[in-house]
Image: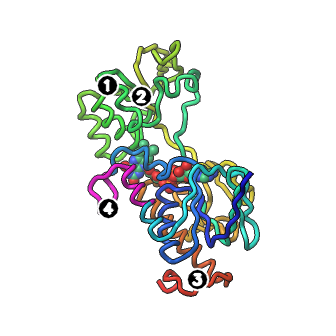
Amino acid sequence: MQTTSAEYDVIVVGAGPAGLTAGIYLSRAKMRTLIVNEGAIGGQLVLTHEVANYPGVESVSGYQLATTMKNQAKKFGCEIRSNAKITGMELEGDVKSVEINGKDRFFARAVILATGGRSRTLGVPGEEKFKGKGISYCATCDGDFFQDKDIIVVGGGNSALEEAVSLTKYARSVTIVHQFDHFQAFPHAIEEAKKNPKISFVMQSTVSEFLGDEALEAVNIRSLLTDEVTTRPIDGVFIFIGYVPNTDGLPDEITLNSSGEIVVSDLRETSMKGVFAAGDSIQKRYRQITTAVADGTIAALSAAEYLRKLGAPLEILEDAAIADA
Ligand SMILES: Cc1cc2nc3c(=O)[nH]c(=O)nc-3n(C[C@H](O)[C@H](O)[C@H](O)COP(=O)(O)OP(=O)(O)OC[C@H]3O[C@@H](n4cnc5c(N)ncnc54)[C@H](O)[C@@H]3O)c2cc1C
């Protein structure tokens, strides 16, 4: 088995907006930077069909924005390893190591964790069986499979309401099923959904079971007020009920909060020396591209400052623009 071993100044784990931003800042400051990424480059960005709230860019597809960020990082010399499953991580001491795919091992004096998050599942009977067979967590990816179909959107936050509106481009009808009697979304998102003639609402209710043979055919909807269960034939269900931080498998020394989010300081320092964290995987209230790129910036600058103070034998630090910034 051919193996690789290499040294870097900083290893960034995750190539979503937070990790790519860290990569841009670090490599532009001439730090040897490696980003290792398990999923699609761009992370959740590539699940976003249109980004209309990234300042300076009126409208762009998530995929395009991710590609631009990736190219920008590479232009400055950042290396990116995709399809990189982390199989070992030693974060103690001044030299850290990250092993990927059980064979390649990389060393660095600082690590930035930017592993983001993933969709939360309902966890009810039938959900596993019908994933990809009528159940989806991504309107951009699967919306056009539901041309002129009747679908349900589960959830009541920004993602649920915005994606419900975007799904009306394809679907004949969209029913939003939400557990509370009010939405936890921005007023403009609520307004857009309410004024859309294809959208209707089933409040204080939840999907309690997915039914079908080979593919999804119906759902059971349970009223949280009366406990009454109604079976409703449906072509598809999109679930937008929040996220789970990708923090499984981190060393125990990295402090997580009760939701599994990485606890960080203002400088995005974790509980381990020389290990920083950024983006959706950290403890914070608002998860947006702008907040992820802000975290990535702060983590990169903090990592650079850490390396400078460490007096690491990394000659490039002497010239790093970042040190003078
Ligand atoms: C459907 C949808 C629509 C959205 N729309 C918008 C919008 O319009 N505007 C907006 O501002 N925000 C939007 N968001 C939120 C925004 O996409 C996220 O806040 C942002 O992508 C978070 O960036 P991140 O870099 O922290 O994490 P992510 O984007 O989650 O990227 C993390 C990366 O790390 C990788 N990874 C995870 N674990 C490991 C591991 N162990 N080893 C290696 N790699 C790993 C993942 O594969 C992924 O590539 C949307 C999100 C979704 C799901």
Which element type, helix, strand or loop, lies under badge 4? loop
The x, y position of residue 90, in whole percent, is 74, 61
User: Disc 1 to disc 3, how far (Cα)?
Assistant: 55 Å
Is 60 in front, or is 171? 60
The x, y position of residue 323, in whole percent, is 53, 84
Q: Which mark is residue 317?
A: 3
Which element type, helix, strand or loop, lies under badge 2? strand
- Quarter of the image holding residue 178? top left
Q: Earlier in the sequence, mark 2 or mark 4?
A: 4
Which element type, helix, strand or loop, lies under badge 1? loop
**Residue type marked 1:** Gln
**Residue type marked 4:** Pro
User: Disc 1 to disc 4, how far (Cα)?
Assistant: 32 Å
Q: Earlier in the sequence, mark 1 or mark 4?
A: 4
The residue under label 1 is 147
Find out whether the residues at labels 2 and 4 contact each other: C-beta distance under 8 Å: no
**Residue type marked 2:** Val
Q: Is 64 covered by the magenta stretch?
A: yes
Tell me the residue at 40%/30% (across/down): 153
The x, y position of residue 221, in whole percent, is 47, 20
The residue under label 4 is 55
The residue under label 2 is 177
Find out whether the residues at labels 1 and 3 contact each other: C-beta distance under 8 Å: no
Find out whether the residues at labels 2 and 1 contact each other: C-beta distance under 8 Å: no
User: Disc 3 to disc 2, how far (Cα)?
Assistant: 54 Å
User: Disc 3 to disc 4, how far (Cα)?
Assistant: 31 Å
Tell me the residue at 59%/62% (across/down): 12
Q: Earlier in the sequence, mark 2 or mark 1?
A: 1
Q: Earlier in the sequence, mark 1 or mark 3?
A: 1
Give the magenta part as a residue range. 52-70
